[in-house]
Amino acid sequence: MFLIYLTEILNMKEIKSIKVNYKLLIFSLFFTFSLLADGDSVLLNIYTVPILVILILLSFYQIIINREGISKKTLIIPFFKTVKKWREIKYYVTVVEYNSDHFSNYNSGYKSALETTFLNSIFKQKTIRNSLGQILKISNCLWFIDQQSKVCLRLDIDKYSNSDEILKSIQINEISYGDEFEVNEPSFPIIGYKKFNEIYFPRNSEELALLENKLTEPEKIKLKNLRKRKENGDKVYLISRDLGLNMFFDKTE
């Protein structure tokens, strides 16, 4: 078994994939075009132009995976990059993220060809409605956790055309933390790394019981009310996910 694993590592080819951050690109281009259209030379000056150019360049980046590790770098300015060796990563977590869709109402009116192309890329993302009827975007992501239990790298795996190849390569080099987890509106700091608290990602009944003991009093009250509604025959999973308590319920409930 070990020889098979070693052979896979040694024969592993380098995988590259390019991605565009359409949100950042749309913001940068829209802001630039707005200033040009308004003829606002005060805001569009020697200070703002370099910033806008840098933001546009940062919108294009590349993922590289090989037997040494995984790196994420901007395509045009390569010194903006994150490089992680496999030995620096403790494990990866498969996470389905549910985030508010801020573009859901932007579907009417005149749009340029460039704007339409960008927005079509965004709208291709799967969506679902939460318990209040609000539209949420679904992102199938991999969180890479380093030895300090921080999310050192995050990949939205659906954004890459060769996602199957990327996933297979990662599975060869890293171990997975549990199965799949669903997280509502995860927050990530602008600077630094997000702390990964294993207690909120229980993998078995023992870890689930430990988490329940750690809940705050308001969370315990919400959980109790959800369980009562379940006993009365109500479907509670969507509500529990909105409240961050979905780990206590089955998806069919």
Image: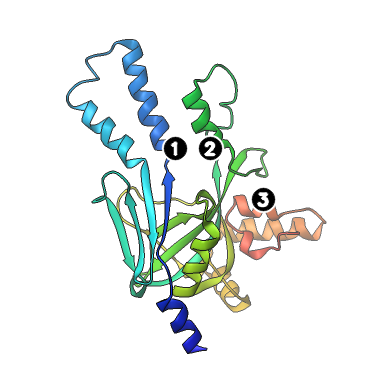
Q: CA distance from mark 3 to mark 2?
A: 26 Å
Give me the residue at 44% from left, 74% from top.
173
Residue 227: x percent and y percent? 72, 61
Disc 1 marks which residue?
A: 22
Per the rendering, the mark at residue 239 is 3
**Which one is in front in this view, the residue at disc 3 or the one at disc 2?**
2
Residue 7: x percent and y percent? 45, 82
Of callouts 3 and 1, the N-terminal one? 1
Disc 2 marks which residue?
A: 122
For label 2, the crowd category at 10 Å Cα-Cα, with few meaning under 14, some 14 to 19 and many 20 or more, is some
Of callouts 2 and 1, the N-terminal one? 1
For label 3, the crowd category at 10 Å Cα-Cα, with few meaning under 14, some 14 to 19 and many 20 or more, is some
- Label 2 element class: helix
Q: Quadrant of residue 137?
A: top right
Of callouts 3 and 2, the N-terminal one? 2
Picture colour scheme: rainbow
CB under 8 Å between discs 3 and 2:
no
Task: State left or right for residue 175 relative to residue 234.
Answer: left
- Label 3 element class: helix
Q: Is residue 35 above or below residue 130?
A: above
CB under 8 Å between discs 3 and 1:
no
Q: Amino acid at mark 2?
A: Ile
Q: Say if residue 174 shows up in the picture.
A: no
